[in-house]
Image (cartoon, rainbow, N blue to C red):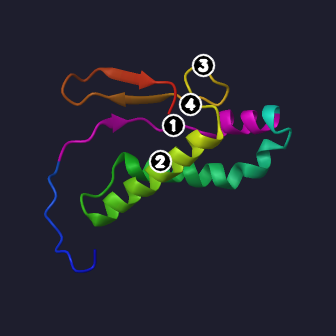
Amino acid sequence: MEGCPRSLMLKLELKESHVTSFAPALKRYVREFYHEDGETYTQECTQLEQLRTAVIKPTYDNSGCNLLRRYYGQIYLLKTRFAMGEGSPASVEFTWLVVHTFNDKYIKFI
């Protein structure tokens, strides 16, 4: 896509989200299902949580889009490797504020 001109992007209001911690659920899942010490993955969990914190308020440019794409890729890979459906052992609750109604919504899986 080197030869393609970059189009202007539309700025849309994003949902306001709260910080979510992946570490407890993922470490517990690794301990119970893989019989490994979940604490060995502390650094990876911290990196994922830092990435999540960064995408809550991304910049409105190409670097923000790249950050969102990277986060989506990580979440997609997590979903393929861990049982993260609602009621599953590794499910994580995501909460966000709906911009127009100011009501909290949540979902407990990826």
The span from disc 3 to disc 1 (Cα, nearest Å) is 17 Å
Q: Position of residue 102 (x, y in %)?
A: 25, 24
- Disc 1 marks which amino acid? Thr
Q: Nearer the viewer, residue 48 or 69?
A: 69
The span from disc 4 to disc 1 (Cα, nearest Å) is 8 Å
Q: Position of residue 105 (x, y in %)?
A: 36, 22
Residue placed under numbered mark 2 in the picture: 52
Residue placed under numbered mark 3 in the picture: 87
Residue placed under numbered mark 4 in the picture: 92
Q: Are the residues flagged by discs 2 and 1 in contact, CB closer than 8 Å?
A: yes
**What is the quadrant of the N terminus in the image?**
bottom left
Task: Tell me the magenta residue range.
Answer: 12-31
Circle 4 SS class: loop
Along the horizontal axis of the image, is 36 left or right of 51?
Answer: right
The span from disc 2 to disc 1 (Cα, nearest Å) is 8 Å
Q: Position of residue 48 (x, y in %)?
A: 56, 50
Residue 20 — which label?
Answer: 1
Q: Does label 2 or label 4 sit earlier along the sequence?
A: 2
- Disc 4 marks which amino acid? Val
* Residue 31 in which image quadrant: top right
Q: Does label 3 or label 1 sit earlier along the sequence?
A: 1
Q: Position of residue 72 (x, y in %)?
A: 44, 49
